[in-house]
């Protein structure tokens, strides 16, 4: 029972958007539209779902004084401060939008932290280019040549060196062989995702419900 | 007194940026501090935006203002489902979270199914059916795209062994994929450098230059 | 000198070379030329074809991790729209930072236009959870999805939302996107509701989006900083106001065209790394496993 109800629900809710797509009658699309708006709210609850786990893990880390426990305090402090300024306006009804401190914390802390974290990758790709990008065989050579042409096509030096030929060549690669390969990947992956969707809707694929035997 | 002329925000922003960049030399406590802060604040940020931007205007406000008007009471259903997602952390009633999960997964799987088939497979396939007998260079380039898509799809078809003709076609598919991966590498480099540039530009133009008045 | 030593050079030296290469053009901009390409011209032409009063949606589907690429794109597109008196509905479906990017950008650019009236000429609707659910629901009623704007103001009394009710009243959706969201606008919103979609994306996504561009599911693709710089160039070539805006030193620091100097230098460094690495590889006899 504890598994059957969820499976039936998955089937019904999963089929509905598909059914509504093919049968655009007002009575059917009305429910579908309600479903869209309802799921926005369910999704809002789902987004911070991992917080409970993370708080539990970090609290136990601090309690047991496991390696790196002071960082767990930093993590929880960041979470508490950001959450406080995030929800305080709604609770006290003083701010309809974001609390000014929330935006300030975002601008000066969350934003640079995220941006810098990702900017480290610039150094890693450069290092990888030097150490691992080798013309070992035909395939690797094709990859290397395509990469260099596209890179030269993106900067003005490419055109300067070749009398304006590099940008059109690079655009040709992007528009023809690249687009063809990407299209092959898109179609292949989309067919895979669609068949997985059917498996979930029909209850063949059930791993998302967890392992319990109930 | 230039340094004090800068806001605390700029200083915090710059110092956190340097904490993350310090990882390039080697792992160190400053980086670990910034990393933990980032993880905590990001989750707190999620809670903040979800509350202010979705739950407040789309759930709390309509329920509080006109519970029965506009069928707002129906919002209790997605609200209940959203809360039920968190039951997974209470062992005795964790099975109830599956009901909410079933609706959540079911809906998105149904939508995804249509996205993939109607929004990707059909239009991408339709656009691959192009004239190749019209003569001229365009017909040749169309042929390149058709061969590319077909050979990449053959490469991804693992139900037959890649030997003989299939093997040869899939080899061509690999070449197309390599061109595309090369192009992707070129573009990825551009993306990563942009991020690095963003941080360096901040450090130079918003922090160092104003600090020394240059 | 031992060639092998060069092959296994400390990675931190490579990092240092990249860092210096990136810093020089920031301290002293070079001003290298930029040539617009067709995928970018597609959006420029689309906005040029619209009449004053037509409406567009700009969705901020990126966070700080793509800010340097997509902020200049957003600035250029917003300026173009506001100059042409196109009504702009701003929104976000990317959870980690999209709405805050929108707040910063819209406040900054809107302040350049004195006659612009909030709620009439443009509105910042804020962020909404649900991704595809929200995108689908917009087809029925924008006001139902966004009963309040980003600051919690009631949208039902805003003139802009009385005129623009759903996708039927929108001429084009412009998604400034990181990750998969740009694709959703094409394979869901364009496919099911027929709204033209243009995507300004982080360069990482651009190769994939060329497939959508070819199939007409996207009318334009602005790939990363280069795409942004091409859009700036199109504005500068066509309008006096753009030449004036982008010659302001404060604006130049933020402009994609300036950023392309950094790109050019670091690209050359990386190409040299690749070529040099390969020369070393062959000179040392193609060592196995390296």
Image (tube, helix red, strand yellow):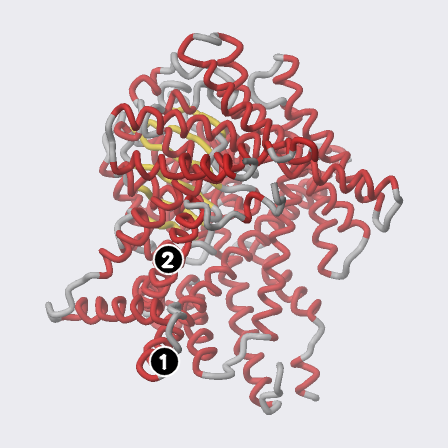
Subunit under mark 2: A
Q: Determine which quarter of the picture holds residue A91.
A: top right
Please say if B105 is above or below C222.
above
Residue at the extreme front: A1
Which quadrant would the C terminus of chain A be assigned to in this image? top right
* Neighbourhood count class around disc 2 (C-alpha, 10 Å): few under 14, some 14–19, many 20 upward: many
The front one of C162 and A208 is: A208
Q: State the image coordinates of residue B177 (x, y, percent, origin top left).
A: 40, 69
Q: Is residue A161 toward the left or the right of residue C287 in the image?
A: left
What distance separates the C-alpha of mark 1 from that of mark 2?
21 Å
Q: State the image coordinates of residue C266 (x, y, percent, origin top left).
A: 54, 63
Identify the element where label 2 is drawn.
helix
Which numbered disc, 1 or 2, marks the residue closer to the eye? 1
- The residue identified by callout 1 is B167
Q: Determine which quarter of the picture holds residue A212.
A: top right
Residue at image position (39%, 25%) is: A34
Please say if B205 is above or below B180.
above
For residue C270, say whether it is visible: yes
Residue at image position (33%, 68%) is: A177
What is the count of numbered marks? 2
Subunit under mark 1: B
* Neighbourhood count class around disc 1 (C-alpha, 10 Å): few under 14, some 14–19, many 20 upward: some
Identify the element where label 1 is drawn.
helix
Which quadrant would the N terminus of chain A be assigned to in this image? top right
The front one of B91 and A86 is: B91
Q: State the image coordinates of residue A131 (x, y, percent, origin top left).
A: 61, 75
Please say if C284 is above or below C11.
below
- The residue identified by callout 2 is A186
Residue C66: numbered disc:
none
Q: State the image coordinates of residue C206 (x, y, percent, origin top left).
A: 41, 55
């Amino acid at each position: 029972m504890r598994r059957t109800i969820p499976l039936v629900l998955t089937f019904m809710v999963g089929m509905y958007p598909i059914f509504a797509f093919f049968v655009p009658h007002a009575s059917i699309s009305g429910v579908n539209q309600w479903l869209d708006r309802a799921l926005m709210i369910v999704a809002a609850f789902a987004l911070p779902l991992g917080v409970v786990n993370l708080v539990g893990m970090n609290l136990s880390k601090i309690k047991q004084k496991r390696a790196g426990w002071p960082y767990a305090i930093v993590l929880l402090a960041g979470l508490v401060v950001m959450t406080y300024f995030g929800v305080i306006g709604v609770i006290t009804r003083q701010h309809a939008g974001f609390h000014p401190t929330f935006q300030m914390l975002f601008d000066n802390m969350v934003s640079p932290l995220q941006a810098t974290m990702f900017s480290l990758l610039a150094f890693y790709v450069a290092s990888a280019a030097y150490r691992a990008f080798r013309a070992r065989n035909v395939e690797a050579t094709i990859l290397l040549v395509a990469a260099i042409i596209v890179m030269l096509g993106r900067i003005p030096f490419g055109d300067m060196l070749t009398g304006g030929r590099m940008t059109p060549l690079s655009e040709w690669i992007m528009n023809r062989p690249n687009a063809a390969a990407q299209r092959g990947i898109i179609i292949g992956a989309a067919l895979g995702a669609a068949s997985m969707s059917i498996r979930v809707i029909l209850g063949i694929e059930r791993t998302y419900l967890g392992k319990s035997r109930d | 007194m230039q340094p004090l002329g800068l806001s605390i925000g700029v200083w915090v922003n710059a110092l956190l940026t340097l904490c993350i960049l310090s990882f390039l030399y080697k792992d160190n406590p400053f980086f670990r501090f910034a990393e933990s802060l980032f993880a905590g604040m990001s989750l707190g940020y999620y809670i903040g935006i979800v509350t202010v931007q979705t739950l407040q205007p789309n759930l709390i406000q309509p329920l509080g203002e006109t519970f029965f008007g506009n069928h707002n009471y129906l919002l209790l259903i997605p609200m209940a489902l959203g809360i039920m997602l968190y039951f997974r952390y209470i062992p005795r009633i964790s099975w109830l979270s599956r009901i909410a999960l079933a609706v959540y997964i079911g809906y998105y799987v149904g939508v995804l199914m249509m996205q993939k088939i109607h929004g990707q497979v059909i239009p991408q396939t339709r656009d691959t059916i192009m004239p190749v007998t019209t003569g001229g260079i365009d017909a040749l380039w169309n042929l390149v795209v058709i061969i590319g898509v077909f050979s990449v799809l053959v490469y991804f078809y693992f139900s037959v062994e890649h030997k003989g003709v299939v093997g040869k076609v899939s080899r061509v598919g690999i070449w197309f994929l390599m061109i595309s991966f090369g192009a992707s590498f070129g573009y990825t480099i551009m993306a990563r450098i942009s991020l690095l540039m963003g941080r360096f530009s901040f450090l130079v133009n918003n922090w160092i230059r104003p600090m020394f008045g240059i | 000198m031992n060639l092998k030593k060069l092959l296994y050079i400390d990675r931190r030296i490579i990092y240092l070379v990249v860092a210096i290469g990136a810093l020089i053009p920031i301290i002293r901009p070079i001003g290298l030329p930029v040539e617009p390409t067709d995928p970018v011209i597609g959006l420029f032409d689309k906005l040029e074809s619209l009449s004053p009063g037509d409406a567009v949606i700009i969705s901020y589907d990126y966070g700080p991790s793509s800010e340097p690429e997509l902020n200049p794109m957003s600035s250029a597109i917003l300026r173009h729209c506001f100059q042409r008196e196109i009504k702009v509905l701003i929104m976000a479906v990317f959870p980690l930072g999209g709405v805050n990017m929108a707040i910063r950008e819209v406040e900054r650019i809107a302040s350049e236009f004195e006659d612009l009236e909030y709620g009439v000429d443009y509105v910042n609707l804020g962020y909404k959870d649900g991704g595809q659910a929200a995108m689908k629901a917009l087809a029925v009623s924008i006001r139902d999805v966004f009963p309040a704007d980003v600051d919690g103001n009631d949208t039902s009394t805003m003139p802009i939302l009385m005129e623009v009710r759903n996708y039927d009243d929108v001429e084009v959706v412009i998604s400034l996107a990181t990750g998969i969201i740009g694709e959703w606008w094409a394979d869901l919103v364009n496919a099911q509701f027929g709204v033209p979609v243009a995507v300004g994306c982080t360069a990482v996504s651009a190769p994939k989006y060329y497939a959508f561009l070819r199939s007409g599911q996207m009318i334009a693709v602005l790939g990363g900083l280069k795409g942004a710089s091409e859009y700036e160039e199109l504005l500068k070539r066509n309008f006096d106001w753009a030449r004036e805006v982008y010659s302001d030193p404060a604006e130049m620091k933020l402009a994609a065209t300036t950023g392309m100097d950094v790109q050019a230098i670091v690209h050359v460094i990386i190409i040299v790394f690749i070529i040099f690495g390969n020369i070393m590889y062959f000179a040392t006899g193609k060592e196995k496993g390296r």
